[in-house]
Image (tube, helix red, strand yellow):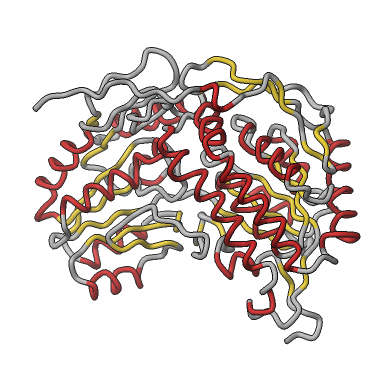
Amino acid sequence: MDFEYAPAPESAAIGRVADRYLPFIDGEFVEGGGDDLTTLNPATGKKLSTVSTVDTADLDRAIGAARRAHSRTWSRMSGAERGKYLFRIARGMAERARELAVVETLDNGKPIKETRDFDVPTAAQHFFYHAGWADKLGHLGLGANPRSLGVAGQVIPWNFPLLMAAWKIAPALAAGNTVVIKPAETTPLSILVLAEIIADADLPPGVVNIVPGAGDIGAALVGHDGLDKVAFTGSTSVGRKIQHTLAGTGRKVTLELGGKGANIVFDDAAQDQAVEGIVNGIFFNQGQVCCAGSRLLVQESIADDFLERLKTRVETLRVGDPMDKNTDVGAINSKAQYTKINSLIEAGAAEGASVWSTSCPLPEQGWFIPPTIMENATASMRIAREEIFGPVLTTMTFRTPDEAVAKANNSPYGLSAGVWTDKGSRAMGVASKLRAGVIWDNTFNRFDPAAAFGGYKESGFGREGGPSGMAAYLAADEGGN
């Protein structure tokens, strides 16, 4: 039976997007000294709002406020009291969940059903989870009384703006640190709404400071000598610069960088289940996910049938208005990213890969790319080695488990991987040989605040989430216990 979904748009008015947003420094919303930034709606390419950005003087003020708040208030507060504030923030996010979801979709371009059902709930979960750790720091293996580090400088990307903010702020606060955080210049709105929630929770001034700006502000922040810890999520190229800047300073650093995750499908896998996992792994958030399963390795004996099943499923994906609750694949976040993705698709075709794209019509305005599969890729092609960060899947085949592992590990990255097989022993055996920080067994893109996340090689180092993520914001007690 042929049928069409009727439009089911969410109301943009629910987001209550303001005409202008301000930096949040020392407990106040203040005009920044930097140039104003215009944030665009990726689905239309039109102006969404204006954001005041900071200059280096504002940055000094924010770090100074964070230092005072740490030494005078936050680090002296009991863990139980700190936890109460985190619980308040989490509840505030839950109460304003629908508004946050709309703001995130308008500013980022991802489908409303993703922000509503994943981004916002998971962000709130991080505050709830870490609130529970605040009075239990002595159980992390760092001694009976581990110490907070001090002031944490944090830089977050544009693909999961609210979730990455929660991912970084929550453990830092639970551990007793204060925070200065810079959002991505293309997606600053949701964290500034979060600032309103933080203010409503009566968090002491200076504990969290939000400093919008471009790359120069990010560089000034991570290089500032007033910090004790740096946490960055973003590109590998920027991560290298940060590591070079911090070398020899003695400051703790966590880098969560790019990825080129491999999804390995064996001939005994439940194929329809695997197809769903592959689709989720690469087309969730338009493939703009650091741990995306962007490389598909299929056992040769089932490759043809599996790819046909995959294409049939991809043809059902609805590409369109991110605010429509029926949309599966939304808009690319920026024109620059849209151009990069298309250039890599063209490079793959020029190198000999076969390009297949869904026939779903695209909107006439905004930055949209159809879900695309690049067949017959080889390990030497750019599309098999570089992070495309878009809805583009490359496919290769293998014959034996050893060949699958060799091809999966033949990457400068090591963030994620997936294994699809009916045999538990095979799944565990292959996983033990994969050089990736996160490995999913018969699923993909499943996250939990209690689980550590991070990578190897050019995907960075350090872990975020779970006890190891908490430990990254603490120092062992002076007794060395």
Q: Residue at x 24, y 67 (%)?
A: 402
Residue 347 in view: no
Q: Position of residue 408 (x, y in %)?
A: 33, 58
Snapshot quadrant of residue 478? bottom right
Q: Residue at x 52, y 26 (%)?
A: 106
The C terminus appears in which quarter of the rendering?
Answer: bottom right
Q: Position of residue 169 (x, y in %)?
A: 67, 52
Snapshot quadrant of residue 51? top right
Query: Is 246 or 462 nearer to us in this picture?
Result: 462
- On screen, residue 326 versus residue 184, left or right, reads left
Query: Is 242 or 454 nearer to us in this picture?
Result: 454
190 over 440 or under it: above or below: above
Residue 400 in view: yes
- On screen, residue 29 versus residue 4, left or right, reads right
Q: Position of residue 152 (x, y in %)?
A: 75, 55
The N terminus appears in which quarter of the rendering?
Answer: top left
Q: Residue at x 76, y 79 (%)?
A: 145
Q: How many numbered discs?
A: 0
Q: Position of residue 82 (x, y in %)?
A: 74, 62
476 over 257 or under it: above or below: below
- On screen, residue 298 versus residue 102, left or right, reads left
